[in-house]
Image (cartoon, rainbow, N blue to C red):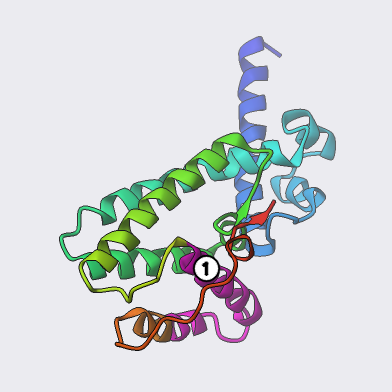
Amino acid sequence: MSPGSLRADAERNRRQLVDAARAVFAARGLDAPLDDIARRARVGNATLYRRFPHRRDLVGAVFVEPLREVVTAARTALDDPDPWRAFADHLTYLCELQARDRALAELLTARMSEVDELDDLRDIAFDYLTALIDRARAAGALRAGVDHADVVLILMANAGLVERTAASAPDAWRRHLGYVLDGLRPTGLPTPVPPARKQAEPLPG
């Protein structure tokens, strides 16, 4: 077999593994068995571990592009002249991502400290999200006291809801989010005391 054919086979195997991992992680989360990914990709376990020696290598290969899309979506939301709509639509987008992809639901609320590029993209995405929150609050569209940590808690809650209702009521998160968004509007009532900062920080990966 020529060197070109070997390279083509290697690239085909890599693409099959990444595509399989995307599907398995989406359905089962970041802790999904790697053996299942190799089986779905129709390659041997040895091939998987040769291309991706550590789980973090495969997670990085799968999710760098989706997180770049999250960054782009957040940046685009800031172009919306309506501060509330920009914030609410982007939060809905994030919750919908969580509903479609269990692994992304985990990545949005947990740091994968061994995947530097994912951490960097996630931090940029949340910087933009913070800007959306600050702008909506400054415009009087978002109740005083709401900040980035509150949205992290909302995403954590949505991730749990999505996981528990995926089979029986896959769109239940939309109803729940509607109530949440109503509660984020200014009401004239005091905002409840926030949790300690460390309690609302993203979970370690």
Q: Could you say where residue 69 lies in the image, as x and y percent from the top left?
A: 41, 47
Q: Residue at x 67, y 11 (%)?
A: 2
- Report crowding for label 1: few under 14, some 14 to 19, many 20 or more residues within 10 A (C-alpha): many
Q: Is residue 114 magenta?
A: no
In the rendered view, does 92 fall on the left or right side of 195? left
- 139 and 156: which one is in front? 139
Location of mark 1 (residue): 155
Region in magenta: 149-177
- 94 and 13: which one is in front? 94
Q: Could you say where residue 153 lies in the image, as x and y percent from the top left?
A: 54, 69
- 8 and 23: which one is in front? 23
Q: Quadrant of residue 145?
A: bottom left
In the rendered view, does 136 fall on the left or right side of 192? left
Q: Main secondary structure of the magenta part?
A: helix
Q: Could you say where residue 159 lies in the image, as x and y percent from the top left?
A: 58, 70
Q: Is residue 155 magenta?
A: yes
In the rendered view, does 72 fall on the left or right side of 9? left
Q: Residue furthest left?
A: 81
Quarter of the image with the N terminus is: top right
Q: How many marks?
A: 1
Q: Could you say where residue 51 lies in the image, as x and y percent from the top left?
A: 72, 30
Q: Amino acid at mark 1?
A: Leu
In the rendered view, does 7 fall on the left or right side of 191? right
Q: Residue at x 30, y 87 (%)?
A: 187
**Helix, strand or loop at disc 1?**
helix
Q: Residue at x 58, y 59 (%)?
A: 109
Q: Residue at x 15, y 60 (%)?
A: 81
Residue 76 vertical position relative to residue 3 in the rendered view, above or below:
below
